[in-house]
Amino acid sequence: MQKQQKELLKVTELKQYFPIKGGILGKTINYVKAVDGISFTIYEGETLSIVGESGCGKSTTGRAILRLDEPTSGKVEFKGEDLLSYSKKKMNQERKNMQIIFQDPYASINPRQTVRQILNEALEIQNVVPKKERNQRVIELLETVGLGEHQLDRYPHEFSGGQRQRIGIARALSVNPELIVADEAVSALDVSIQAQVINLLKKLQREFQLTYLFISHDLGVVRHISDRIIVMYLGKIVEIADKKSLFKNPKHPYTKALLSAIPSTDVEKEKQRIILGGDVPSPINPPSGCRFHTRCPFATELCKTEEPKLRRMDMMKEGHQAACHFIETVEANEKQPIL
Ligand code: SF4
């Protein structure tokens, strides 16, 4: 459940289509519909996670919100201001309020710079600290993320993967952001290191009242950090719920399959694993109707023609919502597909 109800970021009907060029003239012949009309809100102080298989559009959503890629259409409001109407210059200034941590910290840090230079540069670009105070701020930042002053003049390659991610976090924190988009931020790390970085993120959230958009393919990881969770499939949101409700009572057949795939030591749970047939279809020509119908064991003719809208499953504000024509039937036939 969200900790506070004050909206920080509101996304409305966001679309991100990437053109495919072809022919001798290099004209646009089609589009990859990576994100196709999604809407959601992030509240101050919460961690909202987006999960789904590779290609579902979760990372594209994070990049579109920060305008690292220009969205095709839709609305992104940060504290009520329409980010898509900002000039490039104004957006660059606004980015100090919205930072991103990548899976691979090398994507955002210069491997030829020392940690001191990396953090100093971030402070200099956004001019958040007077020059004479920068060195002290750099030391504080490093200590905040669990590293030490003695490591300031080392290069990124001298650190482990977990330590490098801590540098990426320090860099994001350096400009005092309100929102951090963590894009598969712990996916490349060993499980024990993942836990350390997640604990660090949670500690920083409490200390600095941060809001997170946490993007991951791993529901097991998402479980440890989220307040609410969005499940995406092929550019669409198929389910949104608070963490407890999603894990205890998932509604959408796709969410059920994802949850059943989380490794467990419980033999009974392992036996109930739902194996989805086939691969995720191409986002160039997504299936008609419900995009999940080609893999859904409960699909009917209606699913092939009519797109299900997100429906409320409870009466709570921003409560449990899922997009499936047959949720009630699926629940009644949990162990028995309709067809
Ligand atoms: Fe499956 Fe149909 Fe529900 Fe889509 S709408 S998830 S195809 S039952």
Image (cartoon, helix red, strand yellow):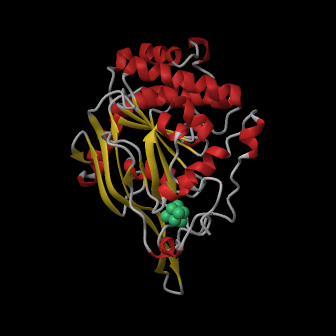
Above or below: residue 39 compared with residue 189? below
Q: Residue 302: horizontal and vertical position, in percent?
A: 48, 73
Q: Is residue 186 visible?
A: no
Q: Quadrant of the N terminus?
A: top left
Foreground residue, 103 or 292?
292
Q: Residue at x 25, y 51 (%)?
A: 86
Furthest residue toward bottom: 24
Q: Looking at the image, how many numbered discs can be counted on the residues?
A: 0
Q: Is residue 72 visible?
A: yes
Above or below: residue 127 compared with residue 140? below
**Residue 325, located in which quarter of the rendered image?**
bottom left
Q: Residue 298: horizontal and vertical position, in percent?
A: 58, 64
Furthest residue toward front: 332
Q: Residue 318: horizontal and vertical position, in percent?
A: 33, 42
Foreground residue, 229 or 293?
293
Q: Residue at x 54, y 21 (%)?
A: 200
Furthest residue toward left: 80
Foreground residue, 307 or 159?
307
Q: In the image, is 130 to the left or to the right of 170? A: left
Q: In the image, is 269 to the left or to the right of 71? A: right
Q: Residue at x 41, y 44 (%)?
A: 320
Above or below: residue 133 compared with residue 1? above
**Residue 339, located in which quarter of the rendered image?**
bottom right
Foreground residue, 178 or 112?
178
Q: In the image, is 82 to the left or to the right of 169? A: left
Q: Residue 209: horizontal and vertical position, in percent?
A: 36, 23
